[in-house]
Each structure stands twice: as C-alpha cells, then as structure tokens.
Amino acid sequence: MPSSAFRVVFHLNMDAFYASVELRDNPALRDNPALRDNPALRGKPVIVGSPPTQRRVVCAASYEARKFGVRSALPSITAGRLCPKGIFVRPRMERYREESQHIMQIVARTRAVLEQMSIDEAYLDLSAVCQAEDADASLLKSLPLARELKRQILTGRQLTAMVGIASNKLLAKIASDHQKPDGLTLIPEKDKVQFLRPLPVRALYGVGKVTERVLTAAGVRTVGDLQDYAGDLRALVGSFARQLKQFAVGADDRPLELGDEIKSISGEETFLKDTEDRKVLRACLKEQAADISARLKHRRLGAQTVQVKVRYSDFTTLTRQITMEEPLTETQDIYRLGCFLLGREKLVSRPLRLLGLGVSSLREPAGQQLGLFKETAK
C-alpha cells in the first residue's frame, strides 16, 4: 500500500459472544428441565458459567445479565445473588472456538489485512481496497463492505456483530463500542475531534482507573477537557502525556500487529521445600497475579485465559486453564481464577515443588481501558 494511501480500519466485535452462541444453540434445554416449557432465552439474563450452587466462576454474560452487575470472573454464587432470575448455562469452549473459525472465514472474504485480537474480536485494514479522492471518501467507500460483513455473519451464523469504521485503531475501537448491540458506526476524519469531545476520558486507549482518577482530580473528565487542557500533562501522567494528547484529537499511528506480538505472560516459583500449606500457596499466587497484572497494564493489554502450573516432588507437571469472554487486567481477578483452578482440579493433593500462574489470549480490554500512570511514569 503506498505511504500516501488513506487508512481505512474496521474494528469487529461480536455481541456478547459466548452468551449469544448459547442463546442461538439453546443448550439450556438439555441442562435445565425447568426451561423446557419456556425455551425462548432471547432477552433473558443468560449467564455462561456453573450454577450458583457450585463454587465456580462466570465466563460470560448476556447484556441483560450485565445490567445486574454480572461480569466475567465473578463467582457464580455472587452472580446468582446479583441476578436471581439469571439463567445459568455451562460453557462450551470448543464450541466457541469452532464458531470463531467460521466467523473469521467470513471476515477473510473482505480481503482485509487482519489482526485477530481474540476469539471474538479483530481489526481489519481495508485501506488497499477502499481508496478514494480523500480520507473521508475512502471511509465512506467502506460502508457497503461493513454492512455486507454484518449481513453475512447474521445470515450465515445467526449472530450479530458491532463494526466501527475510522482512519485508525483508536477511533475504530471507540466506534464499535458506540452502539450496542448490533451497531455500525463510522467516524469521519473531519468530525473526529468533535466526536470525541463529550466522551469520558476513560474511552481513550490507555486510560484506566488510576489514570482516570488522576485526570479527574485535575478537572479533566471528558476528552474535550483533555483537548483544552493548557497545563503540563507530564505532571499528571508522566511519559504517557504526549501519546494521550494525540489520542485526545483522534491521532493514532499504531499499525496492525501481524503475528509478532507477545502471546502470554507468566511467572512461577520453585519452593525451597515442597509444600501444600494453603497460606504459602495463596501468597505465592497473589504475588504472581500482581506481577502479571502490572505487566499487562504496562503493555496496555488484558488476558482472556488464565492458567496454573504445578509440579510435584516426582517432577510430574500439570497445567490447567480457564477462558473468560472479557479480558482481565486486575490482580484480584487473576488471583481468584488461579485459586479456583487449583481447587476445581484438586491440584494440591500433595506437596508442590513448583507453582506457576500465567495468562494468554491477550487483547485490548473491552469497555475498560488500562491505567498507565504508575507504569509510564517510571
């Protein structure tokens, strides 16, 4: 693609993917006899995870369940308390992976350069096939392709997707989040600064809880406030200031990642003496989770898959993992899932020589960006 070409970037994000697949396939009829007289789950608060009577966690939730505060990694018992009428459906990871392959085959027909972020999310660069006389004309030229992509996913897979169209990854991601569910939003170049103004600062890539608190304390609550800020942002967010100011006016030169990006983050500890002391193991997991969380935030990533690794005195080594629909970034969530896996799989049945914790399926967080203040100020 010539360097002078206008960029056209799509962000594709499936609507509540795990829950939507379950709504379509409706396996709850097999697992829950009480639903046989009322098989229409659409519009119901569906929670993908084990029932609240079991010590398990939520993998995903439909939009209706999210309204009650149900989210990935939440204990099932808590989800049941928050959403008493929630319909719990056991997760089927192989089914979701299979469905993802079908969707990505449809995406490939667009002839786009593809960066698949996760099982249900991707960036598409259509610059080579959507060139016109100027930047906004190129974006408008891509609209029929976006509508056809959504149509093919709906008719071929009976699932809905959100598509955001813009000149870069930052804006395309914001556009896809703008209308939920089943949205299609285009942000023209000529309108991007004005489009961003009313949005909360947390809508920008890289702004999470810590950074948002710092900015809010300085009176910067919206992107418009950030655009107008006359002070020195470095005093607030350190070396992130320059990039944050660019993001505030919709500028982003990040290319699509085509396979060289980091795949996983992990840590492990070999004990001086084999142990099954729960207090020691929990402290080890919490320290590893904190380190992983910090490294995720430094790279502005979230993780969908959490894995534990154990090694016994005879050097037998086992690994177990669990995958969430929404990416995780916080120490508490990663730690909780590590503890959950150890308990569910009964891995501490004898003293451990080694304990490890890791994350994979890395992607940009959806709906909540990362706090970078402490990391970028180093």
Image (cartoon, rainbow, N blue to C red):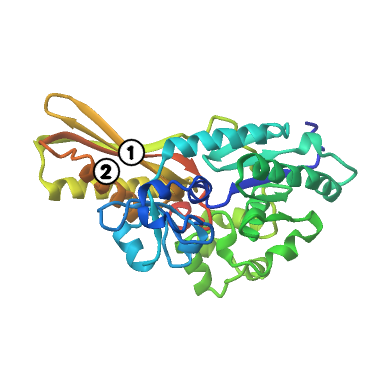
Which sits in the foreground, 93 or 189? 93
Relative height, residue 135 to residue 74 (above, below): above
Residue 268, x across and y down, in percent: 26, 36
Which sits in the foreground, 250 or 64? 64
Res 341 label: 2
Q: What's the residue at 63%, 51% (across, down)?
A: 173
Q: Along the horizontal axis of the image, is 250 left or right of 59? A: right
Relative height, residue 144 to residue 232 (above, below): above
Res 371 label: none
Q: Is residue 297 visible?
A: no
Residue 232, x across and y down, in percent: 59, 65
Residue 186: quarter of image: bottom right
Helix, strand or loop at mark 1: strand
Residue 85, x across and y down, in percent: 39, 66
Q: Amino acid at mark 2?
A: Leu
Sequence order check, earlier mark of 1 and 2? 1
User: Are discs 1 and 2 less than 8 Å apart at CB?
Assistant: yes
Question: Would you call the spot at circle 2 few (<14 residues within 10 Å), some (14-19), or many (20 or more)?
Answer: many
Residue 311: quarter of image: top left
Q: Is residue 328 visible?
A: yes
Question: Would you call the spot at circle 1 few (<14 residues within 10 Å), some (14-19), or many (20 or more)?
Answer: some
Residue farthest to the right? 133
Q: What's the residue at 53%, 61% (across, down)?
A: 43
Residue 30, x across and y down, in percent: 39, 46
Relative height, residue 212 to residue 323 (above, below): below
Q: Along the horizontal axis of the image, is 349 left or right of 285? A: left
Q: Amino acid at mark 1?
A: Gln
Q: Along the horizontal axis of the image, is 276 left or right of 131? A: left
Q: What's the residue at 26%, 48% (across, down)?
A: 340
Where is the N terminus found, in terms of image quarters?
top right
Res 321 label: 1
Q: Along the horizontal axis of the image, is 320 left or right of 123? A: left
